[in-house]
Image (cartoon, rainbow, N blue to C red):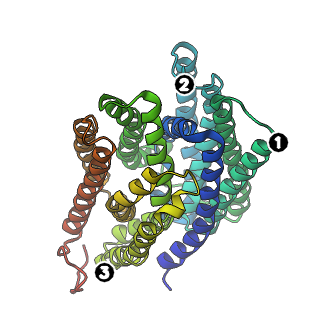
Amino acid sequence: MNSFLKSALILTLAAFLGELIEFLTNMVLARELGKEGMGMYMSVLPIVFLVVTIATIELPISISKFLAEHNQKEHRNMMKHATWFATGIIASVMVVWFIVITFIPFFNHYHPYIGWVVLIFIPIVSYSSILRGYFMGVDNMSAIAVSNFVRKSIQLTLLFLVFRSFHFEDHGTALLVAICALVASEAVVFTYFLITYVMQTNVISRGYRFSYTGKEVRKRLLSVSLPTTGLHLFSASAGAIQPFLIKKSLMLSGMTSSIATGHYGMLAGVAMTIGFFPAFIAHSLLVALIPAVSQAQAAGDRDKLSLLLQQSLRITFLYGIPAILVMNIFAEPITNLFFHSSEAAFYLRALWPCFLLHFFVIPMRAYLIGLGLMKDALYHTIWVHVISFSLIFLLASQREWGVSGVILAMNAETLLLTLLHYFTICKRIGLPILFFMKRPLTKL
């Protein structure tokens, strides 16, 4: 078994256990928060992730790519430069966020302490992400796997204990508890990463002369981080806007604010939670693909690039098709674990193209990053979101379409994004569209 498949297998097994735990976590949240509270929770999470994206500027991706392409003896000094660089960014983001929550009523409809919890979350998740990038780059997927499992286990345990011990009358306080559990679980992961990193770097040579200055390291990191941050910043911004666009469009179709929020809660908190559940395999492929593709690209090995693409797509077919069939056949009993609602089952079945294609998009995005085509990935994402948001507003605001308009727009968005990513990769490597019939390849 080659290193890519071995890394992907380790991550997949750990992610499967983690996703089962997260599934239980969402069940606990759904029952404690209710439909409207779950809608609020799913609306505030994209804002939290948007802030985190800005604070980290996707350094984990650039760090992993940099480390995969360079000698192990250079890793220690490179990490020092990266950490000092990240510290300045984290401090700046914390100052800006402090000003926002102090002077702008950003969380008017939520618990007032949520903004301060996010402020605490920024440095924890940022430094944790930097260390995650290190372990990705050195192909220590066991550390990544353990961290994912630990985070979700701690989050579920805290939620279960708190909600079992206390009863919260209002959704705002329960929502605050849910966010605090997320922050606490990430703090545990950071502690684990830090201890593992210190133990591992002790075996790396301290006397090696680093061939890059701090300025050169920052330049190399930013060459990957800026376009990748642009991609994730836009995606995070779109994710933060989408809940409000959907709810506003549904209200224009004649729904009340409460009903529209409830429908969004079932769509995002139930149907999408279930539908994206198998994506843990896709995310495992993403983590394993970035360093593998980066190494193959640096070596100019087209045979390996072709093989990695074939393997990732075939793995996606093998788990994606059965997963979609199971979700369609057992839609009612699965969604009833959250809410007893026929609408949630319908949403789950209707979104199957979005779910299946999403499984392909994730590893292909990693492939684009490894090839240095982050700008292409960014442009693809911008265009498909412009089209998707336009369709949501035009269709969901019509009484005869409603939530069905949202579903159609989401399916169209994922289809277009999949095709754009796939055609770009094939063109860059020089592969035919149906490249599964392997042909001899030469060096780049």
Which is more N-terminal, label 3 or label 1? 1
Classify mark 1: residues with Cα within 10 Å, few (<14), some (14-19) or many (20+).
Answer: few
Q: Which kind of residue does numbered mark 1 sit on?
A: Ser
Residue occupied by mark 1: 165
Q: 38 or 231, which is in the foreground?
A: 38
What amino acid is found at the position of numbered circle 2 in the picture?
A: Trp
The disc labelled 3 sits on which kind of residue? Asp
What is the crowding at mark 2: few (fewer than 14 residues within 10 Å), some, or many (at least 20)? some
Residue in view at x 49 percent, y 61 percent = 332
Residues at marks 3 and 2, CA–CA distance in whole angstroms: 47 Å
Q: CA distance from mark 1 to mark 2?
A: 32 Å
In the image, 210 versus 431, the foreground residue is 431
Q: Secondary structure at mark 3?
A: helix
Q: Nearer the viewer, mark 1 or mark 3?
A: 1
Q: Is residue 82 visible?
A: yes
Residue at the disc numbered 2? 97
- Tell me which label, 1 or 2, sits earlier in the chain: 2
* Disc on the earlier residue, 3 or 2: 2
The percent position of residue 408, horizontal first and vertical second, equals 27, 50
Residue drawn at (72%, 49%) of the image: 188
Which of labels 3 and 2 is toward the front? 2
